[in-house]
């Protein structure tokens, strides 16, 4: 069956939703379907009226949901032709994660807990998977942190670079995607969390401990050092979020 003509399969897979279902739930149902891996890029979606009938909602809810998905780059509307799926399940996943977190009512505490688990796992993986180039970049980031404890803007940038390189060194793209989303949602607080030179020096010590464990290829020590860093970092971020 051509990828661009699977309307009946899509509508049959959706299932109905209550007539009062909000637009976000219509979009969520479509995203669940699109990221399931069954449909190829270029697949043409059913017409709005067909989607509305399949879901048991009004056409306006479907229209708004599709508009939101177009903004996110999930679908493409071609005037006079129809609406088409833009990417594969793997390329759509990061956008889906970001959308799901942004529309939900997520507390800062929950995001901090999620980040802690992800960063700790990243450190453990990086201890066994980091290349020599990764280690060189991690050392360079720590060196920049050491040189800029009195310049908090530069310090924050070097801190960010360290965590980015560490995530890359984990060689796990799904974790990288998740971390990118969570960090972006916390960035407004993270940029202000280290607010004096003493805080910067403590953060530097914590990063040096993580780097040492990774250089030694000690997965347990790397995870423990990152967990310790996350405890103090989360405390600072939590305090900033309450200001």
Image: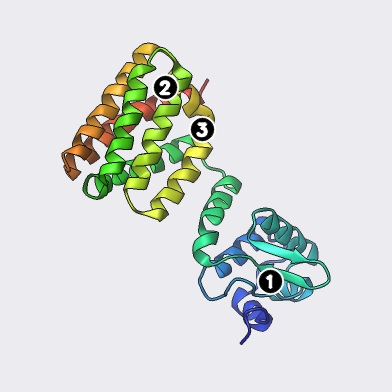
Tally of marks: 3
Q: SS class of the residue under badge 2? A: helix
Tell me the CA gap for discs 2 and 3: 14 Å
Query: On screen, 49 above or below 23?
Result: below
The disc label shown at residue 187, or none: 3
Q: Is residue 226 left or right of residue 10?
A: left
Q: In this view, does 203 lie to the left or right of 192?
A: left
Using the rendered view, name the quadrant where residue 155 is placed.
top left
- Residue 149: percent from left, percent from top: 37, 15
Q: Between disc 2 and disc 1, whose residue precedes?
A: 1
Q: Which of 106 and 218 is in front in this view?
A: 218
Using the rendered view, name the quadrant where residue 1 is placed.
bottom right
Instruction: Single out the mark in the foreground, 2 or 3.
Output: 2
**Residue at the disc numbered 2:** 155
Label 1, residues with CA under 10 Å away: few <14, some 14-19, many ≥20: many
Asked if disc 2 and disc 1 are in contact, CB closer than 8 Å, the reply is no
**Image point (47%, 38%), residue name:** 183
Q: SS class of the residue under badge 3? A: helix
- Residue 40: percent from left, percent from top: 57, 74
**Image point (63%, 77%), residue name:** 10
Q: Between disc 1 and disc 3, whose residue precedes?
A: 1
Q: Between disc 2 and disc 3, whose residue precedes?
A: 2
Tell me the CA gap for discs 1 and 3: 37 Å
- In the displayed image of the protein, which residue is found farthest to the right? 80
**Residue at the disc numbered 1:** 55
Q: In this view, does 163 lie to the left or right of 62?
A: left
The disc label shown at residue 11, or none: none
Q: SS class of the residue under badge 1? A: helix
- Residue 12: percent from left, percent from top: 63, 81
Residue 44 visible in the current orientation: yes
- Residue 85: percent from left, percent from top: 64, 68
């Amino acid at each position: 069956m051509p990828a661009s003509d699977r309307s009946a399969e899509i509508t049959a897979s959706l299932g109905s939703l209550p007539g009062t279902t909000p637009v976000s739930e219509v979009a969520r149902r479509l995203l669940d379907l699109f990221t399931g891996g069954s449909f190829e890029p270029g697949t043409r979606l059913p017409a709005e009226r067909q989607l509305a009938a399949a879901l048991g909602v009004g056409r306006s809810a479907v229209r708004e949901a599709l508009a939101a998905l177009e903004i996110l780059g999930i679908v493409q509307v071609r005037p006079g032709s129809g609406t088409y799926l833009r990417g594969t399940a793997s390329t759509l996943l990061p956008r889906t994660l970001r959308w799901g977190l942004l529309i939900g009512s997520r507390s800062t505490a929950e995001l901090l807990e999620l980040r802690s688990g992800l960063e700790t796992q990243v450190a453990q993986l990086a201890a066994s998977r980091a290349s020599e180039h990764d280690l060189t970049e991690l050392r360079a980031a720590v060196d920049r942190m050491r040189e800029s404890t009195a310049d908090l803007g530069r310090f924050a940038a070097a801190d960010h670079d360290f965590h980015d390189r560490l995530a890359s060194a984990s060689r796990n793209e799904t974790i990288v995607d998740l971390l990118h989303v969570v960090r972006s949602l916390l960035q407004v607080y993270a940029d202000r969390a280290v607010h004096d030179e003493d805080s910067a020096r403590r953060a530097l010590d914590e990063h040096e401990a993580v780097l040492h464990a990774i250089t030694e290829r000690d997965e347990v020590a790397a995870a423990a050092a990152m967990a310790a860093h996350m405890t103090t970092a989360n405390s600072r971020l939590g305090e900033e979020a309450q200001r």
